[in-house]
Amino acid sequence: MKRHLPCLLLACTFIIVHADDWPQWMGPNRDGVWLENGIVRSIPDGGLKVTWRAPVHYGYAGPAVAKGRVYVMEYEVQSGEVQNNPGGRAVLQGRERVRCLDAKTGELLWTQAYERPYQLSYPGGPRCTPAISDGKVYALGAEGNLTCLNAADGSVVWRKDLPREYKVPTQIWGHAAHPLVVGDLVYCLAGGEGTMVVALDKNTGEQKWGALSGQEPGYCPPNLIEHAGRRQLIVWTADTLNGLDPASGKEFWSIPLKPAYGLSSSMPRQVGDHLYASAIGNISALVKLEDGDPGASVVWRGRTKEAVYCSNSTPFVTEDTIYGADIESSALMAVNLADGQRLWETTAPTLGEGKSGRHGTVFLVRNGDLFFLFTETGHLILARLTRAGYEEVGRQKILEPTNEAFGRSVVWSHPAFAEKCMFARNDKEIVCVNLAAE
């Protein structure tokens, strides 16, 4: 088996929040767009200031920020050793935990923990960013423990053990599909016959509907989009890319799209009436969304030396260009949306200029005309990405890489951008970096 990795990271949710909140994975609208004004446009002399640091344990899960509080998941190992074997599971005993911190000071406000043995490949903690909605926190652990907490004090509202309830073993790389909260429903991947994806009442945890069957649910976050005046829930399993009715789970359309190793993990991105989906194994497709009755058809599929194959991080797609980190070459690439032709590529924001390897990772967030790139080397890079090329404005080391992949040190956790700050974590600490312009 070739070496490979899960996406630990990675949709439009129609949640109305203040622009200075980051209440879920990839921001207020789950699109990697940071909405605040008054943000630095370069690295100042003397560097960016780290406002506070707070200790954390293992975790790939990025933080969420809402109403002046930071929420982050972690795993405290009590016995066993964190060893990253792509094809085998490590056995650990430990405790999963949700921490709530004051966004201004880093002060610990509350914790909620539970005992949770791990049997996972890449066992270094939870993968999913908590989702914050209407005073509740929705946290999905690596072994499928879904917990709804009171955001004020961390008390438990309801719990579900997804593998036990749906009678399916946890996939080898754990639960990595960040839960999606829209209206009164929580959407998450579960597994099992007719329940690859489920919609749960967000106040009680009661299942409202289940949909799809297949080999495995995969690792891709469910994604709500709107096209031609109608909402669709986009679910990419280990076998197919699907459009569902978010109210009932009824299947609108389904397209075979099977990544290597079942690793559908990078979230399909909508731009206008198209979706772009890509994964490990040189699997990608640009899909056209049909008007009228919901449907979809493939415009093109990626071929050798075409397209960009994202897995550990989700690409950023504009009206004519795809920007993403290629899982095979580790290069950040710009790709023409219309036909998949590559425009440029560079490893400067992933592994480093001139270096080679696979699974190089960088997380892309746009603020105005700049991209804020958080790299696996722990750097924050300010850059301009255009069809013409990659222009680096500045970079600063923020965190030490504390995990390992393929013989190199990495930090693979999507940061949060809120309150004119970046909140980022490794396996030892979470930091708040001031990004306010003077």
Image (cartoon, helix red, strand yellow):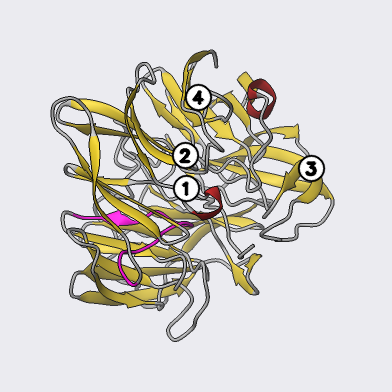
Q: Main secondary structure of the magenta part?
A: loop
Question: CA separation, marks 4 and 2?
Answer: 27 Å
Question: CA separation, marks 1 and 4?
Answer: 28 Å
In the picture, the quarter occupied by the N terminus is bottom right
Q: Nearer the viewer, mark 4 or mark 2?
A: 2
Question: CA separation, marks 4 and 3?
Answer: 25 Å
**Residue appearing at x 20%, y 25% in the figure:** 230
Residue 94, numbered circle? 3
Q: Is residue 64 left or right of residue 121?
A: left
Q: Nearer the viewer, mark 3 or mark 1?
A: 1
Residue that label 4 marks: 136
Of residues 417 and 26, which is closer to you in this image? 26
**Residue appearing at x 58%, y 58% in the figure:** 5
Residue 206 among magenta residues: no
Dot 3 amino acid type: Gly
Residue 123: percent from the left, percent from the top?
Answer: 70, 51
The residue at the far right in this view is 79
